[in-house]
């Protein structure tokens, strides 16, 4: 699946997007796999309460299933203005 990173998440990881192969069943399990990769992912995903996730462009929670998902996006909460 394609994993997209926005704002400070992208800055910490150093990539705007990457292709990820995973056997994770949920978004949270994938985040755990990413955290285990290296320190930059651990830093980006250190506080999940400061992140939002979109699954195939729909807002979701970290317990959302990954079966059939083509795209995940991680970003900080947005505010209107």
Image: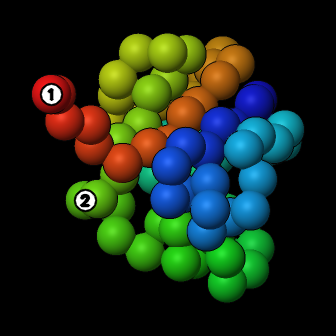
Mark 2 packing: few (<14 Cα in 10 Å), some, or many (20+)?
A: few
17 w.r.t. 31: above or below: above
Left or right, 7 with reference to 1: left
Q: Name the quadrant of the C terminus.
A: top left
Query: Which tag is nearer the camera, tag 1 or tag 2?
Result: 1
Front residue (pair 77, 30): 77
Q: Residue furthest front?
A: 81
Left or right, 6 with reference to 52: right
Classify mark 1: helix, strand or loop. loop
Q: Which residue is mark 2?
A: 49
Classify mark 2: helix, strand or loop. helix
73 w.r.t. 15: above or below: above
Res 81 label: 1
Marked residue nearer the N-terminal end (1 or 2):
2
Residue 56: percent from the left, percent from the top? 55, 16
Q: Name the quadrant of the N terminus.
A: top right
Q: Residue at x 62, y 62 (%)?
A: 11
Residue 15: percent from the left, percent from the top? 76, 53
77 w.r.t. 32: above or below: above
Residue 69: percent from the left, percent from the top? 63, 20
Left or right, 27 with reference to 38: left
73 w.r.t. 20: above or below: above
Left or right, 56 with reference to 17: left
Front residue (pair 7, 20): 7
């Amino acid at each position: 699946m394609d994993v997209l990173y926005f704002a400070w998440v992208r800055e910490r990881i150093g990539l705007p997007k990457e292709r990820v192969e995973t056997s994770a069943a949920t978004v949270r399990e994938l985040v755990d796999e990413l955290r285990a990769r290296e320190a930059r992912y651990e830093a980006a995903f250190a506080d999940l309460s400061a992140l939002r996730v979109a699954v195939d462009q729909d807002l979701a929670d970290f317990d959302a299933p990954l079966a059939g998902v083509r795209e995940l996006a991680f970003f900080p909460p947005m505010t209107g203005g």
